[in-house]
């Protein structure tokens, strides 16, 4: 929803946001508190028919098995689709899955990495406070989803208002506050603690602010500071600001590119969202989740997931989601079911400059990798092919076959006519000089 065509938008989840959840039998201890702190209303099992989302734990965690099988059912009673199923051995990861589905976060805040889980918990902890929050991180790590989580956990009854900082210089503060008053109020759950402020303002890509935009944001912050307290009187601030940036604001302040008075007003509480390459253990889980959501009939091979977890992903979760979406709808090299390394190599985007791909299988073909192995084995064996074959675990004839196939065989030079060779008298020629190839060379 745009106001006056000036970069102001109210972030709407749906006509009836899914914010009430019922946990079925077998729910792990602590999950209900986790979801409650995230701003969801957890209703008792006896009232499950009134919940917007019912979470069924398949198998109810049998003795000795720490795997959670989850199936989600919406309030409309529609049959569960295959992509709504999820399995994990970490109850916090399961809670993040339920949370992402309930709030419809995109990209999902699905994590098993301790660093990312710590960021999510810190976001929920600071949400009930009125202090501004700055979310830093690369493009595609999920800063906007984290901002929506903060808004949900704040228990604010209005929808979050998003401001595009690249066009903020064209927006007046009065327009923003007028938009806040016109944003529809969400029906708050029963018996929920009231919010400490009236609205959340999300500043997207804070580092892209122009000089004029920084001045308008400064006036907006000053106006918010002078705004009367909300009706509950719990806090002197009526508005909460959450900002996201993929640039280093500290360096911008030092270079004079960002106003200090704006920086110190906003940077009260900061969170650094880790890049996807820093949480390699989550890559395979996210890939399976995206694939099941896009095409549940396909699956990754173990080698494909292993290779995928070592890619740098300069575009982070957004790049991974785009890659899996292409793999879900494109023809596969091995048929219509399993996604292998060859499919990854064909659909993977080119790495950013200075960001080398970490998996050699994507830099070269399998033949190139085999060729490199043969060269290293022969060099380590000092040119002895029998020893090189032993090191590779194959026979000498098999090694010779692979040498020829890899194009490493040295072509024989045509023999010169003896009449054309003129050797001066009384000149001794060492025998090694007559050897057509050195000992470490590869020849037939």
Image (cartoon, rainbow, N blue to C red):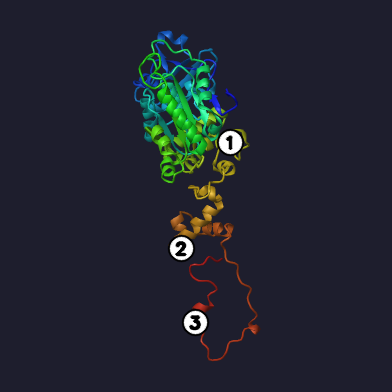
Q: Are marks 3 and 1 in contact (CB under 8 Å)?
A: no
User: At which x and y percent is residue 253?
Assistant: 42, 42
Q: Which mark is residue 430?
A: 3
Q: Residues within 10 Å of mark 3 (few under 14, many from 20)?
A: few
In this rendering, the label closer to the viewer, 3 or 2:
2
Count the numbered circles shown.
3
Mark 1 = which residue? 327
Q: Residues within 10 Å of mark 2 (few under 14, many from 20)?
A: some
Tell me if residue 366 comes above or below residue 94 in the rendering.
Answer: below
Q: What is the distance, in whole Å, between disc 1 and disc 2 at their CAs?
A: 39 Å
Query: Secondary structure under badge 3?
Result: loop
Residue placed furthest toward the bottom: 426
Query: Secondary structure under badge 2?
Result: helix
Q: Nearer the viewer, residue 389 or 216?
A: 216
User: At which x and y percent is residue 301?
Assistant: 51, 37
Q: Which callout, 3 or 1, points at the residue further toward the start of the chain?
A: 1
Residue at the image position 51 percent from the left and 13 percent from the top: 75
Quadrant (top left/top right/bottom left/bottom right) for the N terminus: top right
Q: Are marks 1 and 2 in contact (CB under 8 Å)?
A: no
Tell me if residue 128 comes above or below residue 367 in the rendering.
Answer: above
Q: What is the distance, in whole Å, between disc 3 and disc 1 at their CAs?
A: 62 Å
Tell me if residue 387 comes above or below residue 429 in the rendering.
Answer: above
User: At which x and y percent is residue 381?
Assistant: 43, 63
- Residue 23 can be seen, yes or no: no
User: At which x and y percent is residue 126?
Assistant: 36, 26
Left or right: 345 as drawn, with respect to 223: right
Q: What is the distance, in whole Å, between disc 3 and disc 2 at their CAs?
A: 25 Å
Q: Nearer the viewer, residue 64 or 266?
A: 266
Mark 2 = which residue? 379
């Amino acid at each position: 929803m745009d106001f006056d065509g000036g970069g102001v938008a109210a972030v709407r989840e749906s006509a009836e946001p899914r914010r009430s959840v019922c946990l079925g039998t077998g729910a792990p201890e602590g999950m209900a508190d986790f979801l409650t702190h995230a701003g969801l209303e957890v209703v008792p099992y006896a009232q499950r028919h009134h919940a917007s989302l019912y979470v069924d734990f398949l198998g109810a965690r049998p003795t000795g098995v720490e795997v959670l099988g989850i199936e989600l059912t919406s309030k409309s009673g529609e049959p569960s689709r295959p992509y709504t199923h999820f399995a994990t051995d970490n109850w916090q990861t399961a809670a993040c899955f339920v949370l992402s589905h309930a709030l419809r976060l995109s990209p999902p805040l699905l994590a098993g990495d301790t660093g990312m889980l710590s960021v999510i918990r810190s976001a929920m902890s600071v949400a009930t406070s009125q202090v501004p929050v700055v979310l830093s991180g690369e493009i595609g790590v999920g800063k906007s989803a984290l901002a929506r989580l903060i808004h949900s956990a704040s228990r604010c009854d209005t929808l979050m208002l998003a401001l595009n900082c690249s066009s903020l210089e064209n927006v007046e503060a009065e327009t923003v506050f007028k938009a806040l008053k016109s944003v529809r109020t969400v029906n708050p759950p029963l018996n929920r603690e009231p919010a400490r402020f009236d609205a959340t303002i999300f500043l997207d890509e804070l580092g892209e602010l122009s000089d004029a935009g920084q001045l308008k944001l400064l006036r907006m912050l000053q106006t918010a500071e002078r705004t009367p307290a909300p009706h509950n009187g719990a806090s002197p601030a009526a508005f909460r600001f959450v900002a996201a940036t993929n640039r280093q604001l500290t360096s911008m302040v030092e270079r004079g590119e960002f106003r200090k008075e704006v920086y110190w007003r906003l940077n009260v509480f900061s969170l650094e969202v880790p890049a996807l390459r820093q949480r390699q253990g989550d890559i395979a889980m996210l890939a399976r989740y995206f694939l099941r959501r896009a095409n549940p009939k396909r699956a990754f091979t173990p080698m494909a997931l292993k290779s995928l977890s070592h890619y740098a992903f300069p575009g982070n979760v957004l790049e991974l989601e785009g890659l899996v979406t292409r793999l879900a709808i494109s023809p596969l090299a091995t048929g219509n079911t399993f996604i292998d390394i060859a499919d990854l190599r064909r659909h993977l985007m080119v790495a950013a400059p200075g960001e080398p791909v970490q998996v050699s299988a994507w830099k070269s073909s399998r033949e190139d990798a085999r060729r490199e192995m043969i060269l290293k084995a022969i060099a380590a064996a000092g040119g002895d092919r029998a020893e090189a074959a032993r090191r590779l675990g194959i026979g000498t004839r098999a090694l010779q076959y692979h040498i020829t196939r890899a194009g490493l065989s040295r072509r024989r030079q045509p023999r010169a006519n003896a009449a054309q060779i003129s050797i001066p008298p009384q000149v001794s020629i060492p025998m090694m000089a007559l050897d057509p190839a050195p000992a470490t060379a590869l020849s037939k």
